[in-house]
Image: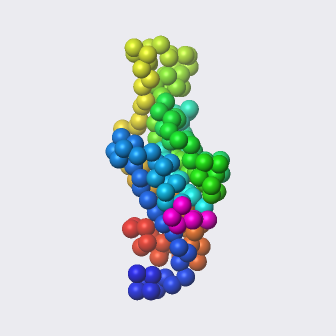
């Protein structure tokens, strides 16, 4: 396909969307370890949704780190850490805040601790904006363009849009 489209200088890139444990019955970290052992990538880039500690960060910030990520930790469902230590290759973690816990939301809105009222029967509640689908779509495009431009710097914006399905 590279030759047919005239992109003969593309760097090799592999992509996977492993889903979550509840969908496939497998830990993402275990799936990634199998892939890493098979193809020996130079780096692993993980992209995930995050829980925010501030309401105004929802859909407005992007977090990038080289220390990895622990999927589910922001919503109290921590899974196996995905980091250079656990994967054996450098990890770049990219996250976009999409949810905030109800206690944080209440504090942001009324300025006092409302944890008891926002956690009925001791259950933590997470809140997401009504326009979450649009927020996710925009964040996905932003992150896709950024990652692809970092990996394929020789490609112009118009060709990049074709490659990422824009």
Image position of 164 (left or right of 60): left
Q: Is residue 65 visible?
A: no
**Residue 41 is covered by the magenta coloring:** yes
x, y percentage for residue 32? 50, 54
Against 9, residue 165 (above or below) is: above
Against 157, residue 36 (above or below) is above
Whole-percent x, y for residue 135 in the image = 42, 47
| Residue 39 x %, y % | 52, 66
| Residue shown at 39% from the left, 49% from the top | 19
Residue sitting nearer the eye, 49 or 53? 49
Indicate the quadrant containing the C terminus: top left, top right, bottom left or bottom right: bottom left
Location of residue 145 with respect to 63 vertically, above or below = below
**Residue at the (46%, 36%) spot, across then down:** 99
Asked whether, in this view, residue 5 is left or right of residue 107, the answer is left
Give whichever of 68, 166 is nearer the camera. 68
The span picked out in magenta is 37-42
């Amino acid at each position: 396909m590279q030759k047919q489209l005239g992109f003969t200088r593309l760097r090799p890139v592999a992509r996977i969307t492993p889903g979550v444990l509840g969908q496939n019955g497998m830990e993402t970290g275990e799936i990634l370890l199998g892939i890493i052992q098979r193809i020996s990538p130079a780096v692993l880039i993980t992209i995930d949704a995050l829980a925010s500690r501030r309401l105004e960060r929802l859909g407005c910030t992007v977090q990038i780190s080289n220390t990895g990520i622990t999927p589910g930790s922001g919503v109290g469902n921590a899974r196996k850490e995905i980091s250079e230590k656990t994967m054996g290759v450098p990890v770049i973690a990219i996250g976009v805040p999409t949810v905030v816990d109800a206690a944080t939301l209440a504090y942001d809105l009324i300025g006092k601790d409302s944890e008891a009222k926002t956690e009925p029967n001791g259950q933590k509640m997470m809140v997401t904006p009504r326009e979450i689908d649009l927020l996710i779509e925009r964040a996905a495009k932003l992150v896709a363009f950024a990652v692809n431009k970092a990996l394929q710097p020789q490609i112009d914006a118009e060709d990049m849009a074709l490659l990422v399905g824009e």
